[in-house]
Image (cartoon, grey):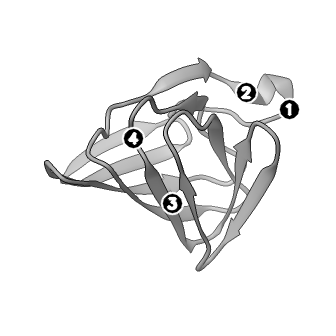
């Protein structure tokens, strides 16, 4: 397992297989990832514990415990913790596929941190 510390929490890379990838995302309350997208990666994010906002280009989707969302490649998004949260991410295998648009969206009223 690979652990990556972030200013918004941490990522635990639990699966890096040829066919799929899996991460546990631990997001702190009032912290968030960068605004970003993935060129090729398709991901499903499941809220195991806590409450987060998934900020998309045209809407905000709030995930509470038991909710999930699937994001297609090229979907611009960021994740903001409304509470301390644990998310499960299952995706196609391109775990490092990320294009950051804005490193610290909080300055524009969104979230803070890096993904």
* Mark nearer the viewer, 2 or 4: 4
Residue identifier under label 3: 45
The span from disc 2 to disc 1 (Cα, nearest Å) is: 7 Å
User: SS at mark 3?
Assistant: strand
* Mark nearer the viewer, 3 or 2: 3
**Left or right of 76 on screen, residue 59:** right
User: SS at mark 1?
Assistant: loop
Give the numbered dot on residue 105.
2
Residue positioned 73% across, 37% down in the render? 111
Of callouts 3 and 2, the N-terminal one: 3
Residue 24, how many percent across, how many down?
39, 59
Residue identifier under label 1: 109
Residue 58 appears in which quarter of the rendering? top right
**Left or right of 6 on screen, residue 77:** right
Residue identifier under label 4: 41
User: SS at mark 2?
Assistant: helix
The span from disc 1 to disc 3 (Cα, nearest Å) is: 23 Å
Marks 1 and 3 close (CB-CB < 8 Å): no
Q: Residues within 10 Å of mark 3 (few under 14, many from 20)?
A: many
**Left or right of 47 on screen, residue 51:** right
Residue 22, how many percent across, how many down?
30, 57
The span from disc 2 to disc 4 (Cα, nearest Å) is: 22 Å
User: SS at mark 4?
Assistant: loop
Residue positioned 57% across, 30% down in the render? 36
Residue positioned 24% across, 54% down in the render? 20
């Amino acid at each position: 397992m690979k652990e990556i510390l972030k200013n918004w929490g941490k990522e635990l890379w639990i699966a890096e297989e040829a066919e799929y990838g899996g991460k546990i995302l631990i997001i702190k309350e009032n912290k968030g990832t960068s605004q970003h997208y993935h060129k090729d990666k398709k991901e499903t994010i499941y809220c195991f514990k806590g409450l987060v906002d998934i900020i998309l280009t045209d809407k905000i989707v709030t995930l509470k415990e038991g909710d999930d969302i699937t994001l297609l490649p090229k979907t611009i998004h960021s994740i903001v913790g409304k509470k301390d949260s644990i998310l499960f991410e299952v995706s196609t295998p391109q775990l490092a596929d990320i294009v950051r648009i804005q490193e610290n969206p909080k300055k524009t009223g969104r979230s803070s941190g890096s993904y």
